[in-house]
Amino acid sequence: MALDLGGRILRSRTVAALASPHGIDRYLTQINPMLAAHEVRARIVDIHPEVSAPGAPRVATVTLQPTSTWRGHRAGQHVSVGIDTGEGRRTTRVFTVSNTESKPGDPLTITVRAHDDEDATPYSISKYLTERATVGTLVHLSQAEGDFVLPHHVPEHIVLISGGSGITPVMSMLRSLQRRTHRGKVTFLHWAPSAERQIYAEELEEIRGQGHGVDLHIMHTADGAPYLSPALLEKLVPGYRDLPTWVCGPESLIEATQAAYDGTESLHVEYFKPPRSGGVAGGEMTFSTTGKTVANDGATILDQAEAAGLSPEHGCRMGICFSCTANKSSGLVRNVLTGETSELPDEQIRICVSTPEGDCAVDL
Amino acid sequence: MTTVEKTGNRRLTAEELEAFGAEMDVIRQRIVADLGEDDAAYIYNIVKKQRAFEIAGRSLYYLPVIGWVPAVACLSISKILDNMEIGHNVMHGQYDWMGDPDLNSRMFEWDTMAPSENWKYGHNYMHHTFTNIVGKDRDVGYGILRMDEDQEWRPYYLGNPIYAFLLMTFFEWGVAMHDLEVDELVAGRRTWAENKEIGARILRKVKEQTLKDYVLFPLLTGPLAPLTFAGNFTANIIRNLWTFNIIFCGHFPAGVASFSQEECEDETQGHWYYRQLLGSANITGGRLFHIMSGNLSYQIEHHLFPDLPARRYPEIAEEVREICERYDLAYNTGPLHKQLFGVFKKICRFALPDRKSSDAAPAGAAPAIEEVAA
Ligand code: FES
């Protein structure tokens, strides 16, 4: 109660006016980084390895204790996580929250797989989290975002489909459903490379054992499990096309699912990573500030700029953090997340999720 | 009008300019590749100190009588750090590479009347691109003063010293109004419509700044309110005097070159560097002095590399000086009193119409620089 009053005072307009132009958080953080009125920060309180099979990238679940400003999340949502990974630079990446829906101030978990392919900071953020971070490390968070969520009123029978680390949002949904004591039926299909590389293996086994209306199918491709097809779906989930379905995973899985559902409205999709290219190649991509021009290969403008030796500012590379916003002076670009195109001159675009179609000029 | 006549500087050939520019590029690349932890630690430390001074300043008002002078001192220091080493430099994008939104040029707002967004246009773009090009760089006289003989004399300019004095005292207001380009408006080269958004931003910012310094914080000190009010006013003025003086020493001491629009047409990168170098002047001093001036005492290096962290300017300066010697270019530097005297002389001299014989070297031209630079 007292805490809440404190929070309300700190968030008041008077305090904002007194702290102007810097904002009260700029002062609070100097006293203690876990004090905040608006921003969200968190301390790592636990790091739990999920997978450390030889040859496979490490996967770990990181538990974060956020500041009291954390507003909680709905199962399936994600957060941007910013970490100072060295050399004075902060890197931001997006991770799905993997624990059950949280309430304001509640701890949250993210499950991270070490990627090699993240950009050239001394440590990629996923590697940092799985290899170097320790209990006590401070991270910067956004509030939870995204509409890949279950409806408040969950239908009688739902289908969850995931592949690889795409399991995290779906797992958060499953866990939340169990806590909500959802009485209906959940069919959960998951593809992983092999049993050793299966994230949350134990917990999934437990769920399978309990029954409770969860129909679990785990397919390990290394063991020759069949890939997703209409026939397989029909066999495992008869009448699946009419069932509300949530799918998250790599592009190939999403595409196969989309094909199998054939445009029905019951399918909800979350790309685990934005589609890499998919743009139309051709024409010239001009970076006006530096005067560089390359042949447009259809990749995102950020990728093309980096390939041309530029290093534009960016964060999440998924269209979420807006740190890569740049001015497009001319040309038609497609938003790879929504498929929308636009060709207004002098537009602010997020270059990480925009692919040029034909000639395009961006102030970079 | 050429730089040669004005400053006694050697004019570089096209090849020399190119080589000169390439040397500057090398410095730049080396520093960019080397940015890291120390730079981040430095600016975080400055921010911490600034916040501490501000909190100390605002708190000391509660100690009547003995607290007032230290309160004003702390607050002045806080405001100076905020504006110079933090605000000005952060808004140049010097720390954007850190990925910290608090120190990001697009998001930073500072403790002065001028809204950052307006200022970034007038300063980062207009002033830093067109440095000392008379008629283009609006910082040449700020549309108020006559600071260069290429600005045509009018009787209005007889008030030059008075305007300068007023501008110095109320500098933060001057900087805020600067973006409205009132002189251009009066001359009919600018429309009211163009100023609408800019004006709205200024109003909002002025409201915020006055609310905290002149209403809320004084009220919070209860019966001591008038003293707090006076203290905040004083701190703002002290900050104004300091920033004005540092900034005017950057471009207006004796021996600084100005350029005509014609000679900067189709300018090469090398010539751009050359113009930045000759159009700026440094101030010598100790480490603390450099920090308090936001390292704008290294104005030359700042103009050559406006987006490199200012703490790097001292190390860059040694190389720049050495390069200047090789190319036989003046490197304008001197202690504060000397540079200030040069500025003061200019303010007074350009109040009056130009003397007839233009052959006579203007007071304090080339020889003065060499002597100072020696
Ligand atoms: S990098 Fe985050 S929106 Fe583009």
Image (spheres, coloured by chain):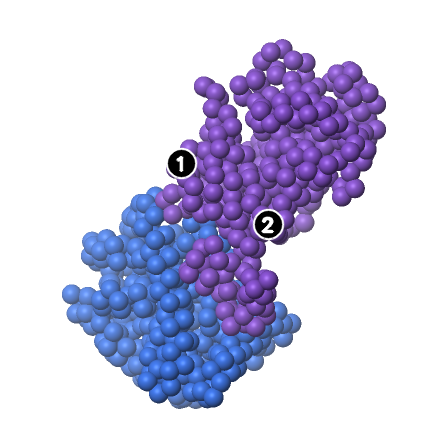
Chain colours: A purple, B blue
Label 2 element class: loop
For badge 1, the amino acid type reads Arg
The residue positioned farthest toward the top in the image shown: A224
Tell me whether marks 1 and 2 sit on the same chain. Answer: yes
> Which residue is at 35% across, 64% downward?
B49
Badge 1 or badge 2: first in the primary sequence: 1
The front one of A230 and B305 is: A230
Q: Is residue A214 visible?
A: yes
Residue A326: x and y in percent read 56, 49
The answer for how far apart the CA atoms under marks 1 and 2 are is 24 Å
The front one of A53 and B295 is: A53
The image quarter containing residue A285 is top right
Mark 2 nearby-residue class (10 Å; few <14, some 14–19, many ≥20): some
Q: Is residue A200 placed above or below B299 in the rendered structure?
A: above
Mark 1 nearby-residue class (10 Å; few <14, some 14–19, many ≥20): few
Is B20 placed left or right of A43 in the picture? Answer: left
Q: Is residue B174 placed above or below A292 in the rendered structure?
A: below
For badge 2, the amino acid type reads Gln
Q: Quadrant of the N terminus of chain A?
A: bottom right
For label 1, the residue is: A132
Residue B216: x and y in percent read 52, 79
Subunit ID for the residue under disc 1: A
Asked whether disc 1 touches disc 2, contact meaning CB atoms under 8 Å apart, the reply is no
The front one of A252 and A43 is: A43
Subunit ID for the residue under disc 2: A
For label 2, the residue is: A143
Residue A36: x and y in percent read 51, 58
The front one of B124 and A105 is: A105
